[in-house]
Image (tube, rainbow, N blue to C red):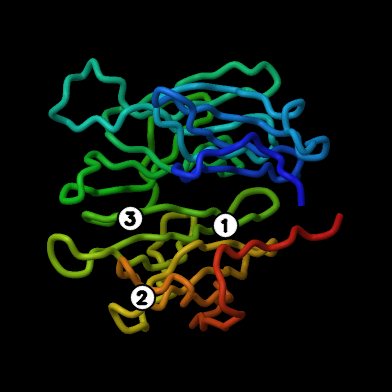
Amino acid sequence: MQPVTRPLRNDYAFEWSLSDDGTHLAYIRNADNGIHELHLVTVASASASASATDDVLHRGIMLSHPAFSRDGKTLFLTEGYLVSPTEPAATDPQRITAIDLATRTSRRLPNPGVTEITSPLDLGDGRLLFAASADFSMAGRDPRLHTMPFAGGPWSTLGPFTVPAGYLSATPSPDRVAPRKLALAWSKRQGGFGADWYTEISIAPLDGASPKPLTPDFPRPFYTAAAPTWAPDGRHLAFVLNLCPYVGCDLNIRSVVLVDTDAPRPKLAFLGHGGSPVFAPPPP
């Protein structure tokens, strides 16, 4: 093994993304004075020092959720402050930033008035998919899925997916042209104030039909799901089942499971203990 990034602070959970062809790695590094840096690494020529191939593309406040476009030409991320509706409008709200990797120029895409934006992803048809909530507070969260053209413009709400006072993220299936469906990770709260969250996994067609739950049969509060990851066939999905979602539980009690999402009644197959599953790409 050899490092491919510059040294990272161990008090900051950095975020990263790999291009579809595996040639470039983007990651966010916490620099000084509260400024975040977006770095781009050329993986094939990375050396142990990682200095010649590690460029700073962008600097800003609260950078997060880096993601490459499917053609590898654009990098998307969110940046800006989480601004509640009661704060002054002069405070810079969170937006999606698009960076052209050929010219290294950046564009900030419009925000029609939400306070939190997460996980911008390329749908493969000229649209971005992302989640947004009008209120980022624990009690007022109401995230929904939206789409927007790459160049910016009006937002469109996608599907009937709402998660009152929870979290929502979507992982598109890796179909060759455009995804047919989404793996939805959405969270609910157990109990009242101060209780922990648990996450469910559902599958939803991209045409907006109602989602199909994959994890409704497990006893609560003993299981929570995480890290949905598509196989290259766009049909099978792996994710992690945590035995206990509570703070202080043994985080090693985790099982990686696999499910055929096209089955009429999907069943989970146990693969092994562990976390963060990743499928190897198909051979060329």
User: Residue at image x 38%, y 47%?
Assistant: 145
Is 232 drawn above or below residue 212 in the view shown? Answer: above
Q: Return the x and y of residue 80 as percentages of the image width and height.
A: 37, 27
User: Residue at image x 38%, y 44%?
Assistant: 131
> Is disc 2 placed on a helix, strand or loop?
loop
User: Which numbered disc, 1 or 2, marks the residue closer to the eye?
Assistant: 2
Residue that numbered label 2 is attached to: 244
* Quadrant the C terminus occupies: bottom right
User: Which numbered disc, 2 or 3, marks the residue closer to the eye?
Assistant: 2
Is 164 drawn above or below residue 125 in the view shown? Answer: below
| Mark 1 and mark 2 residues within 8 Å of each other at the beta carbon | no
> Foreground residue, 57 or 209?
57
Mark 2–mark 3 distance (CA, rounded to whole Å): 29 Å
Mark 2 or mark 3, which has the lower sequence index?
3
Looking at the picture, which amino acid does disc 3 mark?
A: Pro
Q: In the image, 227: left or right of 155?
A: right
Residue that numbered label 1 is attached to: 180
Residue that numbered label 3 is attached to: 160
